[in-house]
Image (tube, rainbow, N blue to C red):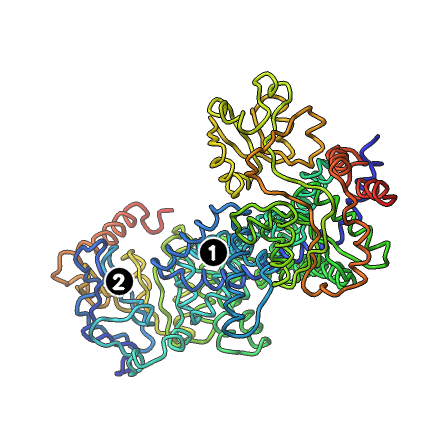
């Protein structure tokens, strides 16, 4: 792993004003975290843990109250937020595809904003459809004519369109059925390796995190509880981390008991 | 006679290019102006809750003002503004017709556009907005390529509502001097020409539906990226706009504009005047259905060239005189006062159209009422009905003061319905007009005014300042002066109150000329 991290959070904090004069909510509390070039990092936590806030701070969909975030050594606050976002792939929770334009226009949106020639965008769209394993005939369809899994494939293609070095994913496969979810996860991991991407993915599913990520960050009520490889997480003294790990463990044990190898 | 062969249909069609063209011109201009103002305003205020609430509140208040009142309000407002610009910047503009109509209608169109634009933009899924930001769009790019296209159906629904409202309300711009399809309705209502009323309503409805459907075509075209549909819809709108240029061209060729107030006698007299001008080889256009106060200002500012007014009306309403003079003195004094404004009082037509208290002959005889003084003794048990303006006119105050009148109830009515209402006993007394033919038709009696509380109302011809020295015009009108006596005018008015083809103002004017020319 290279020594300079691609993304570095240093003592980052962010609060949101409470509703109707209630006390401010600390969404992210003094988090420091490095993501190395080429790494696949999963951030795991329940709702309200601050994991989505942490992700959105990276491309300045929101700005931190204190601390600093650097990408490739440069403070994000010195960058123009629009330029910054065009350089980072982002896959949204429910896809976030624009419903009024075609699949091809959705995929080509960032290249178009960057002023690529139309012919280059067209070629790139075809290339990406192949990459995410969608038929090129899907080009002219509207998002609502696609299945949930196909929509998320388009969403991944859109995030990769302008050849970013890093991709941020906000529970990208959360709403999909288990089979589709597994297939998409594997396909994305293959792309991550093939294209040498740096990926930060949010998920509430520890099994998914274990299967895909190089390292796992565990968040709870704005605090970073643990950051380690899956194998090392088991030795964490934190009760919440242990609880998160217990589910996949139990499932694995029951599955191997119910489906012994060679028994089929 | 079948409705299709009714000559009034052909007559209505002959006015259609002018009325429809003017109607399209005023309503589409108003709609465009309303859009240009309210659309950007909606985008500006949508993230500012206080401003947005205030603006929507104001627009809602405007909406509660009746269309006719809103249109009527803009006329005095612009008059004041015009006098300011004249005093401070040395130029003036016409507060009559097109401008007040466009401004009032544009204001009327703001609510649906504002509300639907704000609602449409508000209704967009937060996830889509975040995605637009996340893929690297600026606020402007997000607005133009994501938010507006997604809000388009709601926004277009607002624009279509506004279009239908504006086209419907534009029929009410006739009394402030803007020719519109309302001319059919106002003229038809006054002369009991129901063919005209229906024709006007139908034409306005067809126009509203047509514009609505063209906008719908543009909307589906934009949504489905069908250039053909959007182009067809736009072409339809452009065709409508082009059609409005036809009456504009036609109007510029006519030299004299004859005004008329909102009642049948005025329609007949303006027809008669135009007939005389035609005979003298002078071309003319009509501006009918003008409100009592609007018409004088229109003449003074040169928006119309001539019309018939009544001495008492000028005396009380225009010059605010309180002392009531005998007939001859009043005309002389009026001539002088009008001359100061360069308006020519060419002369009297020969009859008087005064306000009179009118009741059924039999009823009056039974109660022993012959004069207003006799009526005063009974007034506390009787009801009275008058036209829309009478109770706020100085004559009413004078009557009350002179005779101590105090009725049990008082209500206002469309003048043409008053006579039938009093004949049927729905009200006991009405304020009729002495030249009205219906007095004889329904066997009514006009009560004497021994204290002369009501001034004389001689019909007089007024000419605009720029027609002061127009010999051709004055020569063409001279044969009418002093020739129309009260009996003839009553008969003409009675004819005009019918609801058949022979009762159109043009037909009655022809009859009237036949009576007058031999004298």
Query: Chain letter of disc 1?
Result: B
- Label 2 near label 1: C-beta < 8 Å? no
Quadrant where the C terminus of chain B is found in the figure: top right
Residue, far right: B518
Q: Nearer the viewer, residue B151 or A228?
A: B151
Q: Nearer the viewer, residue B39 or A135?
A: B39
Residue designated by label 2: A51
Q: Position of residue B217 (x, y in %)?
A: 65, 53
Q: Residue at x 50, y 42 (%)?
A: B392
Residue designated by label 1: B114
Q: Which mark is residue A12?
A: none
Q: Position of residue B372 (x, y in %)?
A: 55, 29
Q: Residue at x 29, y 65 (%)?
A: A42
Residue, far left: A237
Q: Is residue B170 visible?
A: no
Query: Chain letter of disc 2?
Result: A
């Amino acid at each position: 792993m290279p020594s300079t991290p691609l993304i570095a959070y240093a003592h980052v904090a962010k609060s949101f004003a409470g509703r109707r004069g209630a006390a401010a909510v600390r969404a992210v509390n003094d988090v420091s975290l490095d993501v190395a070039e080429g790494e696949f990092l999963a951030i795991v936590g329940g709702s309200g843990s601050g994991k989505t806030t942490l992700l959105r701070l990276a491309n300045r969909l929101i700005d931190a109250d204190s601390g600093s975030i650097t990408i490739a050594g440069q403070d994000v606050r010195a960058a123009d937020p629009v330029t910054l976002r065009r350089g980072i792939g982002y896959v949204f929770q429910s896809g976030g595809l624009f419903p009024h334009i075609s699949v091809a226009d959705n995929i080509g949106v960032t290249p178009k904003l960057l002023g690529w020639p139309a012919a280059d965008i067209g070629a790139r769209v075809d290339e990406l459809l192949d990459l995410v394993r969608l038929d090129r005939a899907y080009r002219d369809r509207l998002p609502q004519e696609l299945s949930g899994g196909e929509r998320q494939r388009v969403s991944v293609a859109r995030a990769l369109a302008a050849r970013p070095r890093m991709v941020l994913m906000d529970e990208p496969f959360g709403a999909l059925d288990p089979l589709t979810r597994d297939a998409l996860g594997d396909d994305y991991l293959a792309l991550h390796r093939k294209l040498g991407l740096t990926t930060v993915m949010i998920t509430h599913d520890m099994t998914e995190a274990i299967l895909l990520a190089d390292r796992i960050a565990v968040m709870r009520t704005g605090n970073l509880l643990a950051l380690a490889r899956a194998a090392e997480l088991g030795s964490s003294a934190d009760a919440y981390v242990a609880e998160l790990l217990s589910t996949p463990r139990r499932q694995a044990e029951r599955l191997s008991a119910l489906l012994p190898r060679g028994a089929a | 006679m079948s409705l299709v062969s009714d000559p009034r249909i052909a007559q209505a069609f002959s006015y259609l290019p002018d009325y429809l063209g003017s109607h399209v011109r005023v309503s589409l201009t108003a709609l465009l102006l309303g859009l240009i103002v309210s659309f950007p305003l909606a985008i500006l205020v949508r993230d500012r809750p206080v401003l947005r609430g205030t603006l929507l509140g104001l627009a809602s208040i405007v909406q509660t003002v009746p269309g006719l009142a809103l249109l009527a309000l803009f006329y005095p407002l612009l008059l004041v503004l015009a006098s300011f610009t004249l005093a401070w910047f040395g130029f003036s503009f016409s507060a009559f017709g097109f401008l007040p109509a466009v401004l009032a209608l544009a204001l009327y169109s703001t609510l649906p556009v504002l509300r639907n634009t704000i609602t449409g933009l508000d209704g967009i899924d937060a996830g889509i907005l975040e995605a637009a930001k996340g893929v690297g769009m600026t606020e402007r790019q997000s607005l133009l390529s994501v938010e507006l296209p997604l809000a388009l159906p709601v926004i277009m629904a607002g624009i279509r509502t506004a279009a239908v409202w504006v086209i419907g309300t534009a029929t009410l711009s006739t009394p402030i001097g803007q020719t519109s399809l309302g001319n059919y309705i106002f003229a038809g209502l006054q002369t009991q020409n129901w063919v005209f009323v229906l024709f006007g309503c139908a034409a306005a409805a067809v126009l509203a539906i047509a514009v609505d459907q063209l906008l719908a075509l543009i909307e589906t075209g934009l949504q489905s990226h069908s250039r053909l549909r959007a182009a067809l819809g736009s072409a339809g709108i452009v065709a409508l706009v082009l059609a409005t240029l036809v009456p504009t061209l036609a109007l510029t060729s006519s030299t004299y504009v004859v005004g008329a107030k909102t009642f049948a006698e005025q329609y007949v007299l303006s027809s008669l005047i135009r007939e005389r001008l035609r005979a003298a080889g002078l071309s003319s256009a009509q501006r009918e259905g003008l409100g009592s106060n609007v018409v004088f200002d229109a003449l003074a500012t040169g928006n119309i060239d001539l019309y018939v007014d009544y001495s008492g009306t000028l005396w009380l309403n225009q010059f605010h005189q309180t002392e009531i003079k005998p007939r001859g003195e009043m005309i002389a004094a009026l001539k002088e006062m009008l001359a100061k404004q360069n308006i020519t009082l060419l002369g009297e037509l020969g009859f008087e159209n005064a306000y009179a208290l009118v009741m059924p002959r039999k009823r009056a005889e039974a109660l022993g009422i012959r004069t207003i003084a006799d009526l005063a003794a009974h007034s506390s048990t009787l009801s009275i009905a008058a036209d829309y303006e009478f109770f706020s006119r100085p004559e009413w105050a004078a009557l009350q003061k002179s005779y101590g009148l105090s009725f049990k109830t008082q209500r206002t009515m469309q003048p043409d319905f008053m006579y039938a209402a009093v004949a049927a006993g729905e009200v006991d007394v009405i304020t009729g007009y002495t030249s009205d033919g219906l007095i004889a038709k329904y066997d009514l009696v006009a009560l004497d005014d021994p204290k002369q509380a009501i001034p004389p109302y001689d019909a007089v011809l007024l000419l605009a300042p720029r027609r002061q020295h127009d010999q051709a015009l004055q020569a063409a009108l001279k044969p009418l002066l002093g020739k129309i006596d009260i009996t003839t005018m009553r008969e003409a008015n009675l004819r005009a109150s019918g609801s058949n083809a022979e009762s159109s103002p043009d037909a009655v004017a022809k009859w009237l000329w036949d009576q007058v020319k031999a004298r």
